[in-house]
Amino acid sequence: AKLVLTPRDTAALPGDVSGELGPRSVAGAVWSACVPVPLRNAKVVLTDANALATLLNIADAKDHDLPKLLGGTMLPTGAVSAAFNYCGWQFGSFAGQLGDGAALSL
């Protein structure tokens, strides 16, 4: 099984493709291109067949690409790794720009 994605959200929204890493202000951008930090020796311990089929279009948990996909060493075909920006309250103060740099939307 092969997972194929389209960059629907990143294609429709303004983004930062500078490749610059680390905290920074990204004016006029909803997302920033980023690269996943791969896990070393990632292993799949437990899977749900229904979730794999529905979310990843993978029919077999023994798919050899599954540890690579979940471990960050391989992106699905057509995927764009992006961290999305948002704003809100943090530590009692309004933060004009926050980001989900700890998580990636693929």
Image: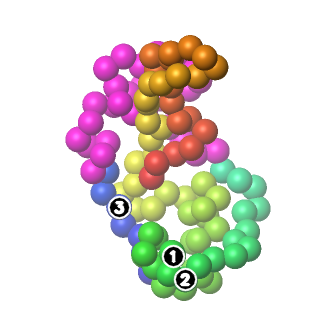
Q: Quadrant of the N terminus?
A: bottom left
Q: Which circle's residue, 3 or 1, is located before the other in the chain?
A: 3
Residue 59, horizontal then vertical, whole percent: 48, 84
Image position of 93 with respect to 55: above or below: above
Q: CA distance from mark 2 to mark 3?
A: 19 Å
Viewed as shown, does residue 68 lie left or right of 79? right
- What residue sits 70% from the left and 72% below the top? 44
Q: Position of residue 73 (x, y in %)?
A: 60, 56
Which residue matches tag 3? 5
Badge number at residue 11: none
Is residue 71 toward the left or the right of residue 97 in the image? right
Q: Is residue 29 magenta?
A: yes
Residue 84, given in percent of the width and then of the height, sits at 44, 36
For marks 3 and 1, give the CA distance: 15 Å
Q: Secondary structure at mark 1?
A: helix
Residue named by callout 2:
49
Q: Could you tell me if the residues under marks 3 and 1 are in contact, i.e. CB atoms within 8 Å?
A: no
Query: Could one spot residue 20 in this view of the protein?
Result: no
Q: Is residue 82 above or below residue 63?
A: above
- Circle 2 packing at 10 Å, graded few (<14), some (14-19), many (20+), is few
